[in-house]
Image: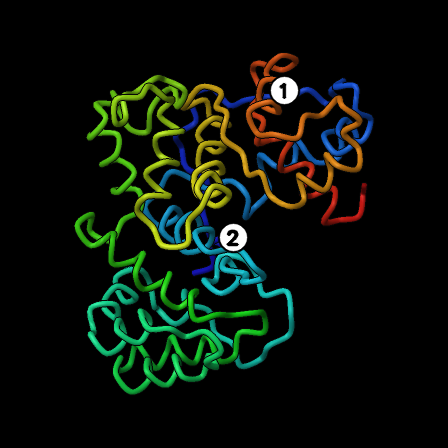
Amino acid sequence: MDLQRDHQPLEQSVNPRTLPDEIDTGCPELDLVWKEYAEVILDRPGILIPDTEEDLNWHAFLGHSIDMQGFRAAEFAGVDALTRPAPNFVSLRDRGVGIAQLASLWGIPPIREHLFSNLRGVPLTSTLEVLESNGGVIGTSLAEAFRWFPWRKFHWSVRAFLENSAVLEPHNFSFRGWLEGIGADLSVSGFPPSDFTDDVAVDGRRMSFERAIRHRLQQTFYMVGPALAPYMICDWQLWLWSRGLTAVFATFKLDSFHEQFVAKYGRGVVPETEDAFIDRWFGVYPDLPPRLVNECVWLGIENGLV
């Protein structure tokens, strides 16, 4: 099943959001990308992540958790369509290799020991051979996927898929279950929460629940840092917000496109740091998530509008 083509809208909408056609931020380029993309984001396949176990597993977890350094994880997982010709490539989803199957490979000592070793300067083929010789049908299938994937790939991307998937075993291999467990640990009422900005206590400090999730993501998962942690949850949050199921939230992805845009067009009106950007945005549009305009920026640069 293709997530983008076959996913059926969920009948969970309580109060669907509406957006202004135009905004006035003092930055003409920011106003332009909003006018072009904001409304379509809420209905565009492949951006928002519905609150289902399947969507969160494939899109937020496998598709976003290691999407960096040129490794296009969403294409590899099969959430996004392949954007470079590769007739022999078959995605994880089409192979039937999901979180449980990847976790099973991490439980095989020769594979785990190889991925823990110093692989600097070692060709990726060595890791693929270890998967094929020790991982049975699943290992061979994963090795074939990496072998034919037309974008950059790394030893660490193999390790991240396996090691991070194994973390989810106590949660029935469910990323949504893992997120719900954080809410239970922090005594958050209801899941998904009605307000991600509610304060919780983490190690003696007060922070918003969304910050707590990001903190836990970075603590728990291999290769998930300050940029990827918010990316793993912000489009799920945006889906919930768009359906009126949660209040406005602050999390967005501070990626290279966003930084490039601010450096070129910010002119002191668009702040550089995450917290300053959030404060500035909420000072003008307190009822709209900054993730909306953040995604508009990405689309504007990707499509050559700015």
**Is 259 drawn above or below residue 116 in the view shown?**
above
Secondary structure category for the residue under label 1? helix
Name the residue carrying label 2. 4
Density class for disc 2 (Cα within 10 Å; few <14, some 14-19, many ≥20) is some
Based on the displayed image, in which of its 4 quarters is residue 276 positioned?
top right
Residue pictured at 34% horizontal, 82% vertical = 140
Looking at the rendering, in which quadrant would you find the N terminus? bottom left
Q: Is residue 52 left or right of residue 4?
A: left
Give me the disc on residue 281.
1
**Is 148 drawn above or below residue 58 in the view shown?**
below
Density class for disc 1 (Cα within 10 Å; few <14, some 14-19, many ≥20) is many
Question: How many discs mark residues in the rendered view?
Answer: 2
Give me the disc on residue 61.
none
From the image, state whether disc 1 or disc 2 is nearer to you.
1
> Can you give x and y, in whole percent of width and height, for residue 211 in the image?
40, 29
Identity, as a three-letter code, of the amino acid under mark 2: Gln
Q: CA distance from mark 1 to mark 2?
A: 30 Å
